[in-house]
Image (cartoon, rainbow, N blue to C red):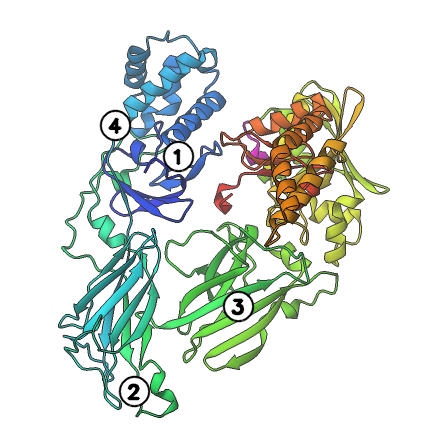
């Protein structure tokens, strides 16, 4: 368990929480207290955003670790309770109006910490604040329960040609474990035609081997030698295991709740005070039905080698796939593009699967089993959020008689937009598969991106200084001015001096090239600038205000056809220059001579390592290059640091300290995750991503709803 890192969390049944790890494995936490189950020592609700929540359990935020939960509690105390005296804190933190006893809470914490009641949260030292947090955890209740992996499983039901279950039939189940070990289970189907349950430690494929009958005959019970000897078998089905939630939930331990209601946090009464019902003795496992489609033909016929049974999923339906081709568009994989598969009723869509959250695309493909007769569509990007779902795309029906429906979607550059091409059309049927064609235009990207309002910007900045709130409202309220080849906006800093934000025309070039409605800067101001999440502008403005910058130039924000999907969902923003104390600090750099020497060494080393055979001279040369590599890299790193500006580095460090900022890429350093313990890596301008960020500073902000 120690090496597993939780990245997502959601409610489980019977007062439990399901945690998902980076490798896709899942764990169930049950028993103990809600604070422990959620890694949330302060019992904070998900609405108290610290940027650290990975989901929720009940009404409360869930965190990846207890440390993150403490960090979120500290964020909440510092940002929402800083000026409140210690004896008054709990009137707001746990008010009496919600059946709490704030005075008793305060007295208990005071007794535990020995802190003077007239002190404020903001006056506490780090050590005192840590003691205060520990006291809150003790009052809230921190008792450990049980953490266990959620297994994957598969069971088969075998039916004959007549559709009746086949009992007494010999079979063999085979699959591979997560360690690559092959497991085999041999047995005999039960009276109701079922195999045993294959329980696996990971998502894997289980094969069902059945005896191959004599020519012209059907499957018969009590066939022998399925797994060995001379008995011939066929692979009757090959199905991927699924999480066996019912088994894990049936073993969940009843949990305890906090001692009080928490408004606005609100105690999890709906789950915490329910009695744990007795679980069934044998919770049903994920089941697939396998039925015989016909007997094996006589020897010598073409169909002799074909399987005479076919896998039939219990809930009959069609696999619907949406496959994206970006060769004519951005030429980039749409990795981590948020999506929801929706079941359509008229123009309205709801998630196809109960409890389905937002998913992130992998390898340009989405595939899902859909029951026969249902119409399904995709909500993409920001449109995947439940509050924004307005534009369902690529709608198709799961037709009976088919095994697959595929929508092949081509991303198309340019301004030749045709809305009819967004609709799946020109179906081509091949056997039991039907393939549609559709297009993804720049305007399509615009349709499913969200245009933020001044009110939404105010909500995102409600705990910030009034000057920062006002600046964001000006940006999203359309207060900027168009003049010549630029859009400018003058905002007031907390010191009452002005700072000018500039968007050069080049910042909207990709939009103008791919969206026909963006014909000028006025259209860009109205439609493109507000599609960037307010948190991104807020992060840059906050750092610029602290540095007392006089100007900030935006290089790129939302765009449809360039780079990763981060810009296209509004969580990425680029800045090309800042002005501080009269100095124009351009966020760009060229390769140094040390960079060039290091790159030349890597090029030569890779060339030699790529050869199948090396001469003795080449072996010696490679050995020398390997010996020189560390020194060359260190020399290049030193040259990079020497070319950096103190003001620029201060500006970037302020961004990284912001809990809303997830990534920073700049001409000098690349920080893939600002919240981990790994330092930023030097930008040697070698890889494509490094070269791309040699001319500007990029940040990615967190959007936990979208999975970022």
Which residue is the site of mark 3? 395
- On residue 259, which mark appears? 4
Q: State if disc 3 and disc 2 touch (CB < 8 Å).
A: no
Q: Is residue 419 left or right of residue 124?
A: right
Q: CA distance from mark 2 to mark 3?
A: 39 Å
Q: Earlier in the sequence, mark 1 or mark 2?
A: 1
Q: Residue at x 61, y 37 (%)?
A: 626
Q: Secondary structure at mark 1?
A: loop
Q: Which residues are magenta?
A: 458-463
Q: Which residue is mark 2?
A: 296
Q: Which residue is mark 1?
A: 45
**Residue 404 - label:** none
Q: Secondary structure at mark 2?
A: loop
| Residue 648 against residue 312 in the figure, above or below | above
Counting residues from the start of the chain, the first of labels 1 and 4 encountered is 1
**Nearest to the observer: residue 384 or residue 324:** 324
Examine the structure image and report whether residue 642 is included in the region drawn in magenta: no
Q: Earlier in the sequence, mark 4 or mark 2?
A: 4
């Amino acid at each position: 368990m120690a090496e597993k890192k939780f990245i997502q969390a959601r409610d489980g049944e019977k007062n439990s929480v399901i945690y998902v790890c980076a490798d896709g494995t899942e764990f169930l936490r049950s028993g103990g207290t809600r604070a422990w189950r959620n890694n949330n020592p302060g019992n904070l609700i998900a609405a108290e955003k610290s940027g650290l929540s990975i989901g929720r359990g009940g009404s409360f935020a869930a965190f990846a670790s207890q440390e993150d939960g403490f960090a979120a509690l500290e964020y909440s105390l510092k940002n929402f309770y800083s000026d409140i005296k210690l004896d008054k804190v709990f009137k707001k933190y746990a008010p009496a109006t919600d059946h709490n006893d704030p005075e008793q809470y305060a007295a208990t914490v005071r007794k535990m910490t020995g802190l003077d009641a007239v002190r404020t949260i903001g006056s506490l030292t780090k050590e005192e604040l840590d003691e205060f947090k520990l006291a809150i955890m003790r009052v809230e209740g921190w008792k450990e329960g049980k953490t266990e992996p959620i297994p994957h499983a598969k069971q088969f039901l075998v039916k004959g040609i007549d559709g009746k279950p086949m009992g007494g039939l010999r079979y063999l189940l085979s699959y591979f474990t997560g360690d690559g070990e092959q497991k085999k289970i041999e047995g005999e189907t039960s009276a109701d035609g079922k195999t045993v349950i294959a329980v696996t430690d990971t998502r894997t494929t289980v094969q069902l081997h059945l005896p191959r009958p004599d020519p012209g005959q059907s499957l018969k019970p009590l066939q022998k030698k399925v797994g060995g000897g001379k008995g011939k078998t066929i692979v009757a089905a090959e199905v991927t295991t699924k999480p066996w939630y019912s088994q894990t939930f049936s073993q969940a331990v009843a949990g305890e709740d906090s001692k009080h209601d928490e408004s606005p946090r609100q105690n999890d009464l709906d789950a915490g005070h329910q009695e744990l019902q007795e679980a069934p003795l044998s919770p049903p496992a994920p089941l697939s039905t396998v039925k015989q489609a016909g007997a094996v033909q006589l020897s010598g016929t073409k169909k002799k080698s074909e399987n005479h049974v076919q896998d039939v999923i219990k809930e009959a339906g069609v696999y619907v796939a949406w496959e994206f081709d970006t060769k004519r568009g951005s030429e980039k994989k749409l990795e981590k593009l948020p999506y929801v598969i929706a079941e359509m009723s008229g123009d309205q869509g709801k998630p196809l699967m109960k409890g389905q959250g937002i998913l992130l695309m992998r390898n340009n493909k989405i595939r899902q089993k859909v029951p026969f007769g249902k119409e399904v569509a995709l909500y993409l990007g920001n449109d995947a959020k439940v509050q924004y779902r307005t534009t369902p795309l690529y709608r198709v029906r799961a037709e009976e008689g088919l095994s697959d429906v595929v929508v092949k979607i081509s991303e198309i550059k340019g301004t030749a937009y045709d809305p009819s091409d967004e609709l799946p059309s020109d179906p081509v049927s091949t056997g039991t598969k039907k393939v549609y064609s559709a297009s993804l235009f720049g305007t399509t990207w615009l349709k499913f991106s969200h245009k933020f309002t001044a009110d939404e910007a105010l909500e995102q900045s409600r705990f910030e200084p009034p000057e920062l709130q006002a600046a964001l409202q000006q940006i999203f309220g359309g207060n900027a001015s168009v003049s010549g080849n630029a859009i400018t906006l003058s905002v007031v800093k907390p010191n009452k001096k002005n700072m000018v934000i500039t968007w050069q025309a080049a910042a909207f070039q990709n939009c103008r090239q791919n969206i026909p409605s963006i014909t000028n800067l006025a259209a860009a101001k109205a439609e493109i600038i507000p599609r960037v999440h307010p948190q991104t502008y807020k992060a840059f403005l906050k750092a610029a205000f602290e540095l007392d910058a006089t100007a900030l130039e935006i290089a790129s924000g939302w765009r449809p056809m360039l780079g990763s999907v981060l810009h296209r969902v509004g969580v990425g923003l680029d800045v090309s220059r800042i002005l501080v104390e009269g100095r124009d600090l351009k966020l760009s750099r060229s390769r140094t001579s040390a960079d060039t020497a290091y790159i030349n060494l890597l090029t030569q080393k890779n060339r030699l390592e790529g050869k199948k055979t090396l001469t003795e001279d080449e072996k010696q040369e490679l050995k020398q290059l390997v010996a020189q590599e560390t020194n060359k890299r260190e020399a290049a790193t030193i040259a990079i640091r020497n070319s950096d500006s103190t003001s620029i580095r201060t500006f970037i460090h302020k961004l990284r300290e912001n809990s809303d900022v997830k990534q920073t890429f700049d001409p000098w350093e690349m920080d893939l995750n600002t919240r981990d313990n790994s330092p930023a890596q030097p930008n040697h301008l070698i890889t494509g991503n490094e070269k791309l960020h040699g001319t500007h500073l990029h940040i990615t902000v967190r959007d936990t709803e979208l999975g970022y």
